[in-house]
Amino acid sequence: MEYPVIKGASYILAHTPDFIPFGSTQVQARKHNDESYLSELKKHLRPFSDVVSYPPNQCYIGNITPAALEEMATPWFEQKAGEERFGRHGEIMPQDEFFALIKHSDAFDLVKLTPEFIEHANGRLAQHPLLSDIQLKVEDGMAAAEMHAMIEAHTADPLTMNGELVGCIKQAHDEDENLSAHIILENLSVKASAILAALNLKKQGMNLGKVDYIIECSEEACGDVNQRGGGNFAKAIGELAGCEQATGSDLRGFCAAPAHALIHAAALVKGGIFKNVMVVAGGAVAKLAMNGRDHVKKELPILEDALAGFAVLVSENDGVSPIINTDIVGRHTIATGSSPQAVMTSLISTPLKKVGRTIPEVDKFSTEMQNPEITKPAGAGNVPEANYKMIAALAVKEGQLERKELMNFVKEHGMPGYALTQGHIPSGVPFLGHGCDGIMKGDINNFMIVGKGSLFLGRMTNLFDGISTLIEKNPGVQEQESGFDQDEARQLIAEAMKEVAERLMAKGEQE
């Protein structure tokens, strides 16, 4: 059986310190007039250079491996892992370039920039390896005074750089709150960051012009008063990423959505409906400085200061790239329950048992890859480590692992968390790039992607969610059992049909 493969995976971060006021924690602080927190917050912001050199960020874009990150001294925010903003798997973009990309992503002239900033941004874009063909029109600029008037009238939200107004994002409708300036800002941020992630696949040799279908799986939803989550982010992203031959749609599932999308993509390719499916997601503005209060209290830098995005290309089997083994898919069903043991059994043990494999046979597990330097100060603990301990305990319970080997299992089959708390971003997919590299180098044979989500957040159900699948070494294009491949089969059939036709013709001539 031919399995779909992962041809490439890209990861991006967009440093957006001036978007932090739009994060949900800060919006609530303003609502309650908590000026002391908002004022103190500003003192904990990092410069772009610190964001680039931060070890988990360097790991996210592929410049250092999770194993190398694990060997680094903590706290990581006191260490530097390099000064290169471009990585094997993607890049870290500064805010001025991201503002320019947001403007480029705007199809309805809702983003306004000052002429001075446009000139500055054009200079920056000209030097970018993927965006040098984009040039914003200076004549489309707007004076800062005019922007101030709209902001004061609450019909636009500001775009600032170091306290200076350089642009604004206007509301798209004067009554529909689904098209307010704030929502447009959030949605354009998703679109722009996802476009950047998609474009970074090109640096890995991917031809986006051959993408047939796009699945967008971030946590935002775009629409208007009549269809609040109508979409379609996927085609909007594909339009500016050069995916001219693609159609697509959005998939939502809270944090588990990327894992669901990956399996959807695999099914579409395996079923022969599409040859190349791109799974893509942009960042969540609401999650910026989500744990800011706890970080400020503990005198830590604001580490949730960037938007994250990723893109994955799933294609037909090429005989080389790592396969998505669609025979191994774990499901958290409606009847599963929400206890940790029930969740891990349904997502990990059950699908492996189905094909006669054990938990220790999986080289690496990528679960909820949140950076513990973000979650521990907020009281959420080390999420990846907790997951690995539960997986190890399950292996012990099922007689596949000695109890004394539990912590060795955690170290050997797990990894440190290094993704931002952007909801959907940490859930399994951050390791696709590193994991596929490891398989291609022969360091590992396989790894499991485990996505988990909290459906109860939408107040429609108390259910939990989760889905998983195994990525593994490509065994090569499989030959038919009879000893010849498909091309040989086609040739033999053609020759047989030709022989039959010749006999019929000869018989007709005799009669």
Image (cartoon, helix red, strand yellow):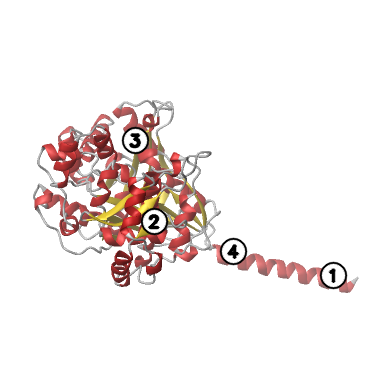
Q: Secondary structure at mark 4?
A: helix
Pointer 1 with pointer 4, Cβ within 8 A: no
* Mark before the other along the chain sequence, 1 or 2: 2
Mark 3 belongs to which amino acid? Ser
- Residue identifier under label 1: 507
* Mark before the other along the chain sequence, 1 or 4: 4
Choose mark 3 or mark 4, whichever is in front. Answer: 3
* Mark before the other along the chain sequence, 4 or 2: 2
Dot 3: few (<14), some (14–19), or many (≥20) neighbours within 10 Å? many
The residues bearing labels 4 and 2 have C-alpha atoms spaced at a distance of: 58 Å
Mark 1 belongs to which amino acid? Lys
> Which residue is found at the position 13% from the left and 47% from the top?
43
Q: Position of residue 482 (x, y in %)?
A: 54, 58
Q: Secondary structure at mark 3?
A: helix
Quarter of the image where one finds residue 219: top left
Dot 2: few (<14), some (14–19), or many (≥20) neighbours within 10 Å? many
Q: Is residue 158 visible?
A: yes
Mark 4 belongs to which amino acid? Ala
